[in-house]
Amino acid sequence: MVQTLFIGLDGATFTILDELTRDRPGDGVVMPVLKSILERGFAAPLRSTNHPLTPPAWVSLMTGRSPGHHGVHDFVRFEDKGDDVYFTLYDARDIRVPTVWALAERGERSVTGLNFPMMAPPPDIKGNLVPGFVSWKHLRRNTVPTSLYERIKAIEGFDPKELAWDFEREGQIGEPMSQSELEDWVTHHLPREDQWFRIAETLLREDNSDLFAVMLDGTDKIQHQCWHVMDPALWPEHPSEDDRRLRDLVLTYFRRLDGYIERLVALAGPDAHVFIASDHGFTGSADVLRINRFLGETGYLTWHEDDGSDASKRRADANFAYLDWSRTLAYCPTPSSNGICIRVADGPGKPGIPPEDYGAFRARLMADLRGLINPATGRPAIRDILLREDAFPGAAMDQAPDLTLVLDDHGFVSVRNRAPVMVRRPLPLGTHHPDGVFFAAGPGVTRGLRGGRLSIMDVTPMMLYTLGLPVPIDFEGRVPAGVFRDDWLAEHPVRLGPATGAVMAEADGSAPVTGAASGDGDEDGEMDEAERDHILDQLRALGYLEG
Ligand SMILES: [Zn+2]
């Protein structure tokens, strides 16, 4: 019997959902089911990780720990080897703490988790896990148990190419989109979301796991590209025909999403606790800040010489810093990181600053960054600079950039060598905002309350609590006051349990499942160079670059 149903909506924000749950002239109530959940349940803004990016944020939501502890900081990890910097993708093996799936199974609760990032290669879980953010070629070998892939394959209309990330297709979309490309972008996500919904519906009906969790990420993808027709503050009094048509398509997506929520909640039954949450919120970003261009002009880095070859052109256009490492002291590695790495020399004559100069160098760099004024607004381009030791304390702190930039409009930086340092887009793109959404409904949940801001790390404690399990004492999150009624909490007190370190020690020695042999000729094992490039293109398509 489902005790806890979790529905993740990547990037969902109250800026949009409040509009879609009220009666609007012309549109009516686009999401009546979510509206009824608001009325009979609890809702609150949900504060994301200090850098509100999808991989670290979902992993925090799934572990109850911050990135400095769980170890996933970005899509891409970089390793400075002195004369070059290497980039690799983060994956499930980088998560250093137990996930909610592991903790639930340890408490003898059955689990199903669908479409969450950083779940491949599959962790050692007995329940059902279908990972998100992998290409269809790798879906079978990364689905556990092995028999689950055959089950989902048998669902009518199942199409792995529609279900998984379409790197080929989405990789082509890097330039600002035309009207028809925008419409295609939205229409592409309708069947994709439907695939995930049908898997969720089937497994919910047939397996009824104690903890049933599914993540839908069309919200994020659509908001990145279509923000200008979604944000009520940007909607013109007399919209163009094109804008109206695109907005209607977007509303079609949200109407369907509301239908999915209705069906999943109904299948979970009236005794289940229902949580709906996003990994971060959304807002509009019009400014492009070419941060490495700025660092070049201020003398912190040197660009790699373009030798005119195709390879050199490709690298210069990539989503990674392409720099002369022998003459670079500070650089931004990836647009999604919004981070700046300071290079500290690991010996005399090696590239980087002497270790004893770190404090003074960092202070000077921060002062230069704070002095960067956006010509379009006359305001500082950077609203906040997070220090690694403050924002990401923990055993995995060293993997975080030395500085993390919060831009004035919450945008992601660009790492390309183009002038000028700052430009303004004609239309704002959607970007991540630190405040996401949280909804709860079910037995004991406070009715009709919009509470104060919760932490993304509070969600795993609430899932464990509603499964009847103790909350590990080393969690940074908690079961927050206000979500459940006092009389319910008195009858069902929150129990604290052993630290997660103990769980990890116990699980030590169990080999990770590496997936079954593939049956189809097109499916292969390792991620190749081309596919990695597609993932990087995908990051660009998501608006982490100006294109
Ligand atoms: Zn996200």
Image (cartoon, rainbow, N blue to C red):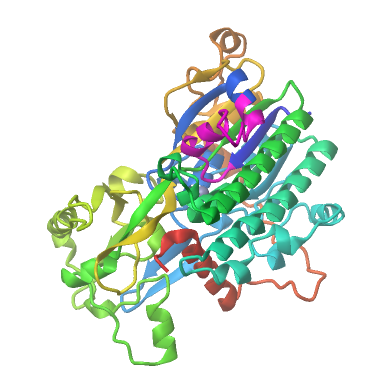
Can you say whether 21 is above or below 85 in the image? above
Residue 55 lies, in percent from the top left, at 50, 52
Q: Identify the image quadrant of the N terminus.
A: top right
Which residue is rendered at x = 45% and y = 56% of the image? 74
Relative horizontal placement of residue 49, taking residue 7 as reference (left or right): left
Along the viewing direction, whichever of 504 and 383 lies nearer the viewer: 383
Can you say whether 339 is above or below 219 in the image? below
Which residue is rendered at x = 29% and y = 47% of the image? 389
Along the viewing direction, whichever of 350 and 449 lies nearer the viewer: 449
Looking at the image, can residue 124 be seen?
Answer: yes
Q: State the image quarter where residue 445 is shown.
A: top right
Relative horizontal placement of residue 269, taking residue 307 as reference (left or right): right
Range of magenta residues: 9-35
Which residue is rendered at x = 59% and y = 36% of the image? 26
Along the viewing direction, whichever of 254 and 469 lies nearer the viewer: 254
Residue 115 lies, in percent from the top left, at 65, 50
Which residue is rendered at x = 74% and y = 36% of the image? 110
Looking at the image, can residue 456 be seen?
Answer: no
Q: Identify the image quadrant of the C terminus.
A: bottom left
Residue 419 lies, in percent from the top left, at 26, 73
82 in the magenta segment:
no
